[in-house]
């Protein structure tokens, strides 16, 4: 075979190789297939436990699985978490303009929902779960709220765990403590028993009001951000927030922080600057909507759904009788954020007064029931 023929064959091979590479790289179907087949299958690790389900880290990704036996609760959590995620995205620009010094709370986005009967999914996924959780149950994938930085974890252990050198060392090396999220309890101070006790886990660490004050945290800013988040849940998503959580955690991506660009050509040209979002490493997150209900913009739903959900929840929110200044900060911010949201929705004057009705009713019920049993007042989703 001549050198000319060999060269031609090599050129042909190169061309075929190039075509195949381009086909694989640019074809949507090939990209999807490569993503599924090429991903390294690593064992899943438990990073959280809850009443609705167990949360597993998906190694090598920015997502987690939430898996449990109650399909209806998981589906509710899946749908309403996404409803709140969309509500945050839809109001983000307007609220950041109204509150330029605050970081608007986030909600994770849920992606895939798999039933226990989805054989193709479970054939690949089931072996990846820990042996004690290797059962086919409904689950969904969701943005993982990343843990607080390691230096913050170690400081929490230094401050609130047993001072023994051995305990401190073991706590800092414990893999479970690396899954550190902080529950923000602005409505509760440590009891005498809690103050004398020591903590032993950083998972869902309960940071109560007096602890934040001792650390010199900006509690007024946290209260304001929580108020903005609750206003989004109530008036944009129209979800009552029953049993929802507010936690401090980190984020792997800032995609939700992209502003909505100006698109209205009917407006006369003007000096327009895209809003700059307040960014920081640690964010306030809203999650767990498996017990929530949808609401209508009526006074009846405010009193029968929003108020019980607020008072019956864990003590995330400031209360009018524990710290009045903090309550006033929370209330004024909630009213302002609610007004921004409801104005954008174009609702009537009756609906626009509902946030004030809500706060007034919370104060009335709180004053009348300081010694009540909160469990008697909770109405979970049906």
Image (cartoon, helix red, strand yellow):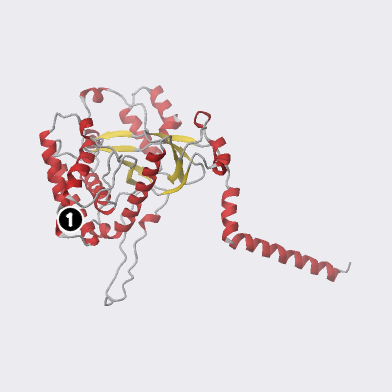
Q: Work out whether 349 lies above or below 378.
A: below
Q: Is residue 28 visible?
A: yes
Q: Position of residue 99 (x, y in %)?
A: 23, 56
Q: Residue at x 19, y 42 (%)?
A: 304
In the image, 61: left or right of 160? right
Q: Position of residue 92 (x, y in %)?
A: 30, 57
In the image, 246: left or right of 329? right
Q: Position of residue 67 (x, y in %)?
A: 44, 37
Viewer-proximal residue, 176 or 317?
Answer: 317
Viewer-proximal residue, 6 or 166?
Answer: 6
Q: Work out whether 104 lies above or below 218.
A: below
Q: Quadrant of the N terminus?
A: bottom right
Viewer-proximal residue, 313 or 322?
Answer: 313
Count of labels in the image = 1
The answer to which quarter of the image holds residue 312 is top left
Q: Quadrant of the C terminus?
A: top left
**Residue that carries the numbered disc 1 in the rendered image:** 351
How many residues crowd mark 1 within 10 Å: few (<14), some (14–19), many (20+)? some
Q: Position of residue 219 (x, y in %)?
A: 22, 42
């Amino acid at each position: 075979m001549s050198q000319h023929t060999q060269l031609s064959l090599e050129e042909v091979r190169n061309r075929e190789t190039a075509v195949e590479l381009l086909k694989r790289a640019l074809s949507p179907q090939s990209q999807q297939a490569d993503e599924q087949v090429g991903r390294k299958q690593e064992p899943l690790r438990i990073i959280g436990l809850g009443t609705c389900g167990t949360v597993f880290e998906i190694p090598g990704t920015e997502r987690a699985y939430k898996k449990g036996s109650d399909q209806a609760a998981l589906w509710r959590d899946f749908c309403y978490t996404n409803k709140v995620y969309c509500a945050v995205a839809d109001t983000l620009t307007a609220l950041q303009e109204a509150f330029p010094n605050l970081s608007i709370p986030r909600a994770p986005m849920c992606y895939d929902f798999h039933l226990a009967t989805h054989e193709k999914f479970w054939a690949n996924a089931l072996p990846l779960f820990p042996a004690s959780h290797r059962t086919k149950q409904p689950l969904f994938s969701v943005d993982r709220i990343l843990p607080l930085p390691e230096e913050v974890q170690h400081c929490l252990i230094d401050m609130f765990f047993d001072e023994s050198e051995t305990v401190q060392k073991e706590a800092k090396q414990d893999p479970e403590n690396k899954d550190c999220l902080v529950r923000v309890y602005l409505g509760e101070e440590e009891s005498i028993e809690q103050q004398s006790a020591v903590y032993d886990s950083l998972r869902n660490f309960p940071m109560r009001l007096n602890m934040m004050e001792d650390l010199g945290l900006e509690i007024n800013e946290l209260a304001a951000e929580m108020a903005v988040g609750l206003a989004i849940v109530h008036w944009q998503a129209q979800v009552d927030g029953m049993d929802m959580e507010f936690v401090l955690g980190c984020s792997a991506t800032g995609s939700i922080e992209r502003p909505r660009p100006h698109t209205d050509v009917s407006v006369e040209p003007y000096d327009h600057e895209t809003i700059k979002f307040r960014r920081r490493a640690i964010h306030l997150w809203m999650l767990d909507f498996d017990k929530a209900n949808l609401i209508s913009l009526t006074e009846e739903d405010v009193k029968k759904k929003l108020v019980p959900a607020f008072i019956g929840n864990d003590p995330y929110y400031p209360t009018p009788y524990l710290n009045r200044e903090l309550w006033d900060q929370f209330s004024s911010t909630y009213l302002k954020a609610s007004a921004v949201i409801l104005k954008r929705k174009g609702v009537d004057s009756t609906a626009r007064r509902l946030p004030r009705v809500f706060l007034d009713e919370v104060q009335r019920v709180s004053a009348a029931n300081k010694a009540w049993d909160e469990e008697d007042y909770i109405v979970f989703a049906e």
